[in-house]
Image: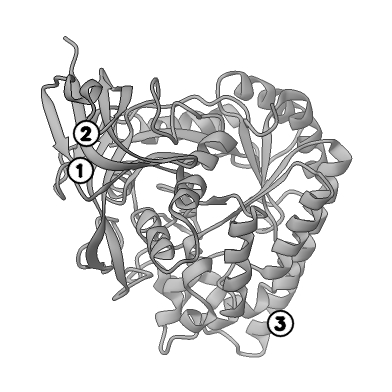
């Protein structure tokens, strides 16, 4: 039995076009687009019709940086794949790429299997995996080739967190050389973790234990230094590089310089760096703990350079690095010692709305909004045009978005499984109304109509900017 849905009278916005068009969906895929009101569009018949008059019709968001159920600092990220993907759908995101973790002493396959087990049958939207490589050895390098073949085409390494995820320069170089051969993309957490650990120890010895010191010890220069080093290691290896959660203007400058040299270097930032700052880390009492993440929030003047980087394409993607920990019982583990605060912020539900607010504020265009949140992440990680656009043949991952609705962000009303909002009380213009995932309505006029298990695992091809 084929099923057909038509979305009528909306403004279809993709990374490349804005057109008043109707969208015909058949069997979970986009079958056709036709200008609204034309005989071709009027002739379509369908079981369901969605009226998008006065609304945007946009591709579902693609969030390529989430951490559901991540073990960290003696606890776990508070969103499961079920709660996290439901919250993502509420926020207009229809695909996530999460991080499977290799533990030291274990194989990549063991880590990947563990994450498949967490996610399978639990997701409301489609999902894929990157692989965190924590233990580079001959077996790991061989496994990287096998994972690329089966659709896990990106590998994350850490210059931070010695003793947990950390790789030294030699291990990083080996993994980069392997990715240069197998077509994989290395994603780098670029902070000089060895130097940061010295500064942490010194700060604590001085009695500087409050959350704000988390930002002070993880210096912008140590992000820039690591970014520079990662770029040059990638250049030596002849490999592409994707730097995650860029927060500092000095790191943006390193990326811009490398791109001006013609290197295949890409950068991602996150809403927290665009909208929050060290002012939040310095909130009185222990409130600043809510904003502890790494890379850390920076002084406000960095925001302008990040927005500039998004406009000039020195930064290409906005992801969330969604890694929520409840204030009560989790963030509180670091009372009296900022280094014990679990690192991470909730945000998977807020990204599309916050970036639309940037459109309203004139920071980016509508098409750039879709580019950095949908199309480029899908291309970067081998999912385009199945994901990230509205075009015949693409998955019918579509959001009907009301650009005029007003909302106030609050933990009272969000759907993430966390007891605070990083954007509490913020007024936003624009709101998700209806969300389709492969043609199925998962949010219907502000009601959740999806289900755990609808989302399917999505193998990926290699980075489409390198073809």
Viewport quadrant of the N terminus: top left
Residue indicated by mark 2: 7
Q: Position of residue 355 (x, y in %)?
A: 42, 59
Of callouts 2 and 3, the N-terminal one: 2
Please tell me the numbered disc located at residue 52: 1
- Distance, label 2 to label 3, CA atoms, is 59 Å
User: Taking 232 as reference, is 23 above or below it?
Assistant: above
Residue indicated by mark 3: 202
Of callouts 1 and 3, the N-terminal one: 1
Q: For the view shown, which residue lies furthest in the top direction?
A: 1
Label 2 packing within 10 angstroms: few (<14), some (14-19), many (20+): many
Of callouts 2 and 1, the N-terminal one: 2
Nearest to the observer: residue 142 or residue 245: 245
Q: For the view shown, which residue lies furthest in the left direction?
A: 47
Q: Position of residue 67 (x, y in %)?
A: 46, 48
Q: Secondary structure at mark 1?
A: loop
CB atoms of marks 1 and 3 within 8 Å = no
Q: Decide if residue 178 is on the left or right side of residue 1.
A: right
CB atoms of marks 2 and 1 within 8 Å = yes
């Amino acid at each position: 039995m084929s099923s057909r849905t038509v979305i009528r009278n909306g403004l279809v916005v993709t990374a490349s076009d804005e057109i008043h068009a109707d969208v015909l969906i058949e069997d979970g895929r986009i079958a056709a687009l036709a200008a609204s009101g034309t005989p071709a569009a009027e002739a379509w018949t369908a079981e369901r019709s969605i009226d998008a008059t006065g609304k945007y019709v946009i591709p579902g968001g693609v969030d390529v940086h989430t951490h559901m159920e991540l073990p960290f600092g003696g606890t776990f990220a508070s969103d499961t794949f079920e709660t996290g993907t439901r919250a993502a759908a509420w926020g207009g995101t229809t695909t996530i790429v999460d991080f499977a973790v290799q533990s030291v002493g274990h194989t990549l396959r063991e880590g990947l299997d563990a994450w498949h087990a967490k996610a399978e049958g639990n997701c409301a939207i489609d999902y894929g995996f990157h692989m965190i490589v924590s233990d580079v050895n001959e077996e790991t390098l061989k496994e990287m080739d096998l994972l690329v073949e089966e659709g896990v085409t990106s590998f994350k390494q850490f210059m931070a967190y010695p003793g947990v995820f950390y790789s030294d320069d030699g291990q990083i170089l080996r993994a980069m050389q392997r990715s240069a051969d197998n077509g994989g993309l290395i994603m780098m957490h670029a902070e000089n973790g060895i130097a940061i650990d010295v500064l942490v120890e010194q700060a604590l010895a001085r009695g500087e234990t409050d959350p704000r010191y988390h930002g002070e010890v993880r210096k912008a220069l140590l992000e820039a230094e690591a970014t520079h080093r990662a770029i040059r290691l990638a250049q030596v290896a002849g490999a592409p590089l994707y730097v995650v959660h860029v927060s500092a203007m000095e790191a943006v400058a390193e990326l811009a310089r490398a791109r001006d040299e013609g290197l295949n270097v890409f950068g991602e930032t996150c809403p927290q760096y665009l909208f929050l700052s060290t002012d939040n880390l310095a909130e009185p009492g222990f409130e600043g703990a809510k904003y502890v993440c790494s890379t850390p929030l920076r002084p406000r003047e960095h925001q302008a350079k990040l927005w500039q980087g998004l406009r000039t394409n020195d930064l290409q993607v906005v992801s969330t690095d969604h890694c929520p920990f409840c204030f009560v019982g989790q963030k509180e583990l670091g009372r009296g010692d900022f280094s014990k605060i679990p690192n991470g912020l909730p945000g998977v539900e807020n990204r599309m709305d916050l970036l639309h607010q940037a459109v309203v504020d004139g920071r980016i265009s509508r098409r750039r909004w879709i580019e950095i949140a949908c199309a480029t992440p899908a291309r970067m990680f081998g999912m385009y045009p199945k994901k990230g656009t509205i075009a015949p043949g693409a998955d019918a991952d579509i959001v009907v978005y009301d650009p005029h609705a007003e909302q106030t962000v609050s933990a009272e009303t969000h759907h993430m499984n966390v007891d605070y909002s990083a954007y509490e009380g913020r007024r936003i213009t624009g709101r998700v109304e209806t969300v389709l995932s492969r043609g199925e309505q998962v949010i219907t006029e502000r009601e959740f109509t999806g289900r755990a298990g609808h989302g399917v695992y999505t193998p990926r091809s290699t980075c489409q900017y390198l073809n």
